[in-house]
Image (cartoon, rainbow, N blue to C red):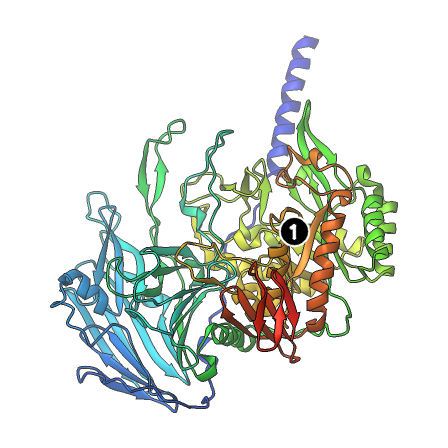
Amino acid sequence: MVDKYWKYGVALLVVAILGASFFINTINVPYGIAVAQDNFRSVTVNDQMGICTNPLIETNIPERFKKLAENEQLELYLEEETLAIAVRDKCNGYTWFSYDVHRDLEAEGYSQEMIRFMKSGISLITYDRFTPGRRTVMDSKVEKTYEMLEDGFRVAVDFTEQQIKFDAIVTLQGGDLLFNIPQESVVEYNPDLWRPGNNNISMNDLIIYPFFGSATHKEDGYIVIPDGSGAIINLKETPTFTTGYSASVYGRDMGYENNPRSSRNRFTVKPLERVSLPIFGIIHEVDQAGLLVISESGSSYATYNYRSRDTNTDYYQSYFTYNYRTAYAQFQSRVNEDQYVLGFQPKPNQFDLVQRYVFLNGEQANYVGVAKNYRDLLEKKDALTQRNTLDFENIPMKIDFINNEVTMGTLGMENVSATTYRQAKEVTKSLLEKGYNHLNVSFKTFIQKDRTYKFDVLRNLGGKNEFEETLQFFADNDIAFQYYVDYAQSYFDKTKYTANKMNRQDFSVWNHNLNVINFMNNPKFFTSLAEKDMKNYQKHQIGHLALESLSGSLFTHYDKGTIGSSVEGMEYTKNLLQYFHDHGIRTSMYTPDAYLFSLIDDYFDTPITSSELQFVDATIPLVSLVLSGYKDMYSPYMNFSSNDQESILKLIEFGVYPSFVLTGESAYNLKRTASNNIYVSEMEYLEGRIDDFYQNINESLSEVIGYEMINHRIVDHGIVIVTYSNGKEIMINYNDTDYFYEDVQIKSKGFVIL
């Protein structure tokens, strides 16, 4: 009898433990956040008449285009049949068309389908029995109802056959043209949509003016693309490569994709650089006629597209598309992923689509003007402000210490002590003794129970006393300190905060840099996680955080019957940063996206290269031109530079300060951890490289600390001149031979301050 009760008791204990575990590991936070209404009409980027010199030859505007609106800077014309527009810049007389109105496209052999696409102001991509198809406003059974406004027009577009409709509003505002599709106007009104047996025709993408500013060639023109740090493609009569390029703004929406399969034999390809700026530029005549295009609202669902001439048409194209729905694999078997049907979300993605065209003339009509005008928008709309760091004699340098990692041991996860608090203090002290008196230090600690990088004081690193002594040492020596944290994802395993993809699977992604699988957190938990940590931050006086992975946390996902959007993800992320600010904690970030620029202190892991695709003619510091003088920018880790000379010159050119990642113990210990990509990190091996980088970069950038980069010119092959607001100019020579500029000699692989 005793044995019987004993067995029942054990069983009840197990049930109790499991039940408690369930409630402990279940967190109930309802999904939903109010997305702030975009105030795009309250802001004008080009709000001043430029100095109008050397007006260009005015282009005839066909009579079928009717003038609808005019202000001091622009005139707007409309072709009602096609929804095509023409915009005349009154400063230089140049007219921009949404397609080439002066060529007979039919006589030149273009198909009627292509002609309709080229002429149509808006094209719609639909799913038709799961197969995407392209439709235009010139197709039959498309109704367009116009309402003329004082500053432009509103058109109700109804694809009656597909039963999809929306409104488009096109208006002038100073030297800007605004294109807007209000969220509430987008309607799929087929009452049988998604019913079994119905021919489901649903929205996929909208394409907005894909040939606006397109050109066959321009002798002095180019396209500015937002790839990585930025790049330009010259509008040559014969393209270097006949190809296209597409990249999602702020990264791919992984919520629609299948989970990666773990494999030791996985073959990885270096991913393209991210698009962190929702802009592109078209320059037809340098310093005379240019255009900045901004995906201002709906940018997290935008894709940037470039097409060279001689692909589908004779024209270079640059444009955005906007995603309203993407098919995903709905698996029918838990063991066989080949068994699936295509799934679709019931409603299209909810966002106000706003695209702004800023017309550039005079000295603004170049890639520098593209960057500066976008920066002006961030100032006026997001309250981006300049910072004052003019009181330093030497440049700052970023040091990230990897303190703790974990690896799989015999009995489970085990801590790997990479840098103790005392070791971090001693390494930092040695740098101070070498004259590096403007250091910016972060601690990076992997916490086993959270499966991610969080703040905690660990005994294996020295405990509370040594941690506090180290922080006091930093404070006494004016060393800026942040703690590295990752609220966006977990490593190796899912947690109770893990989101679900649209196919209901746990949200996992392949980390190409680390060759590990990460699990993305549902953004609704961001602030909850911060609230849990706040007491610990305040207890240990942590006043500055270095945030990782938030730039990859925008996605569409499933949440208990609700579809979470990337637009809401943006709002959750901004709320997280605002929560920290409200509690007196500053925030810096690794590779932040543009919508967060006004909420960060420092910019870590600044892109210093584009994807260097074969069709690109030059990589440019587009991000640096936007943020210099406003944020201190730090490089990716320079531990692994394959060409130190080139890297040093690149940091000087881009106005970016050096960063290194260090450990007190051997990097070999990191081999089977989440920092397995760090293969050299000890001071004894990096000391010479650190000295070389710092001394060369300090020699140049110490002259311009805190000043804005106001100009960047490519004066010859491998020769650039960078100008700052204090009048200093830095000339850089990437070539293997010396270069003479006027009466100045620049040594090969060198620089001079003019």
Q: How many marks?
A: 1
- In the picture, the quarter occupied by the N terminus is top right
Rendered residue at 77%/70% (across/down): 392
Where residue 468 appears, x then y in whole percent? 85, 50
Q: Quadrant of residue 19?
A: top right
Residue 290 showing in the rendered view? yes
Determine whether, in the image, residue 125 is placed left or right of residue 554: left
Q: Position of residue 15 (x, y in %)?
A: 61, 25
- Residue 460 is left or right of residue 90, and the answer is right
Q: Quadrant of residue 585?
A: bottom right
Give the answer, above or below, for where 607 lies relative to 414. below
Q: Residue at x 69, y 34 (%)?
A: 668
The residue closer to the viewer here, 505 or 674, is 674
Closest to the observer, 605 or 1: 605
Mark 1, Cα crowd under 10 Å, few <14 / some 14-19 / many 20+, is: some
> Which residue is disc 1 drawn over?
638
Q: Amino acid at mark 1?
A: Met
The location of residue 705, given as percent across then percent down, is 70, 71
Judging depth in this view, the residue of 103 and 473 nearest the camera is 103
Residue at 51%, 56% in the rendered image? 569
Which quadrant, please, contains the C terminus? Answer: bottom right
Give the side of residue 188 with respect to residue 521, left or right: left
Q: Residue at x 35, y 59 (%)?
A: 240
Answer left or right for 91 relative to 97.
right
Percent position (x, y) of residue 222? 39, 69
Front residue of 657 and 434: 434
Q: Secondary structure at mark 1?
A: helix
